[in-house]
Every structure is written in C-alpha cells, then in structure tokens.
Image (cartoon, rainbow, N blue to C red):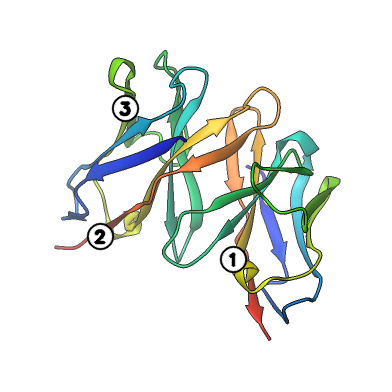
Amino acid sequence: EIVLSQSPGTLSLSPGDRATLSCRASQTISSSYLAWYQQKPGQAPRLLIYGASRRATGIPDRFSGSGSGTDFTLSISRLDPEDFAVYYCQQYSDSPSITFGQGTRLEIQ
Amino acid sequence: QVQLQQRGAGLLKPSETLSLSCAVYGGSFSGYYWSWIRQSPVKGLEWIGGINHFGSTNYQPSLKSRVTISVDTPNNQFSLKLKSVTAADAAVYFCARFSGWLSTPRFDYWSQGTLVTVSS
C-alpha cells in the first residue's frame, strides 16, 4: 500500500498570504493518479485538483497543483477567508489501491 | 448536477451488520466506479471499496473479508454491507463517484455522509 505523508500538519497563515502544502508518497506514483481535496467542518471533501495539476470544475485559479514521482504540492496563491480548511491528497494505483494523506489543517493566523 | 443521497442506520451494536445505500441523481450511472469511503479521527479518510454498473467490485484488502458492495443499476443505486462491526468501524461513511479511473482517477461527487456509531 502506498502511504501519503502530508506536511505540515498545521499551517497558520493570514488572508492574502500564499500557502504551500506538501504531499509525499512512499513510492513513485503517476502524476495522473494524484488528487487534492478540501474539507470544511461537517462537510464532505471537495475535489480541487486531479491529475496532479488539473483544476476541477468551478475551482478558482488561485489553486494550483504540481509535482511528480513522490513529491507533490498544492499551492494557494492568495488566501481567501473561505480557504481555511483541511486539505487532503489522494492517490490511485493499480490493484486497485486508493489511499489518502492524513491532511494539512490550514488555519487563520 | 450529480447528487448522491445516502440512507441507512447510524447506530449499531457490536457484531451487527452495517447497511447503507446511496442513490444517484443526475448524470449517467454507467461508466463510473461508485465507491464507499469512511472517515474517523483515528484512521482519517479510508477507501472501503467500489463497484461499477456491471457489478464488478474492488475492496480495501484489510476490509475485504467483511465487506459487500452491490449495485442496483436500473434504480441508480448502490449499497454497502459491513458485517461484524466493532468500535473500530465507527466513522462517518460517505458514498462517492469515482471518475476517470483509466486516465485521471478522482472522487468528483460525494454524499453528505452518515455518522455511524457502534455501542452496546
């Protein structure tokens, strides 16, 4: 099973700041198979990015994804108050096997 | 707009069977992998398994012996059964649509979730 490790566990920033969230896989994965989600309290996760860098429908362009191999990044260019939430990465591999990272909490400083 | 609506009991006793169903409204039911995912404070988000409209299934290996996912394609519904539950199975259970599994797989639509509690 591929393990995804997200860092940092908590990120404290202010509205207008740039956020950089990391997701590291325990083995190489295809960038096509890496996705990012946002989750707010009491809600289901919402798809933000898939294929490592493709924004899902309706997602603002301040969200961007990058990376390859074992290291992937979610960037939020200018934080909006609504962006403070928990973010998860998720991978798919043949078997099939699907795993999620443990999450990064983005909180208002 | 695709909507997933869950139904099922949220309070179980140890050793009972968890049963949840998920109805899909809007969009096509064919061509996707319909999945169950759970979330607990201990294990985080955990994929349980999925099924396509033909009834082909895949399960999380650690749960495979206790899980059955079935599909009712004419009614755009799929279901989860997890037998012999314990306190470790307490979680919020989501159903979700898994898209693009041959190219860029992702969960693009989710239900609102059902809190499942296991207590004697």
Marks counted in the figure total 3
What is the three-letter code of the residue carrying label 3? Gln
Image location (x, y in percent) of residue A84: 62, 71
- Alpha-carbon neighbours of circle 3 within 10 Å: few (<14), some, or many (≥20)? many
Q: Which x, y percent locates residue A101?
A: 63, 56
On screen, B80 above or below B115?
above
Place residue B66 in its image quadrant: top left
In the displayed structure image, the side of residue B68 where residue B33 appears, left or right: right
- Label 2 lies in what chain? B
Number of the front mark, 2 or 3: 3
Residue at the spot of label 3:
B77
Whether the residues at callouts 1 and 2 have beta carbons within 8 Å, the answer is: no
> Which residue is drawn at the image coordinates 79% and 44% (left, top)?
A53
Q: Chain of mark 1?
A: A
Quadrant of the image for the N terminus of chain A?
top right
Q: Which residue has dot 2 on it?
A: B117
At mark 1, the secondary structure is strand
Q: Which residue is rendered at x = 63% and y = 27% of the image?
A: B100
Secondary structure found at label 2:
strand
Residue at 69% over, 71% down: A80
**Other residues around mark 1 within 10 Å, as few (<14) / some (14–19) / many (≥20):** many
Assess whether mark 3 and mark 1 are in contact (beta carbons under 8 angstroms): no
Q: Hey, what amino acid is under mark 1?
A: Val
Same-chain check, marks 2 and 3: yes
1 and 3 marks on the same chain: no
- Report the residue marked by disc 1: A86
Front label number (1 vs 2): 1
> Which residue type carries mark 2?
Thr
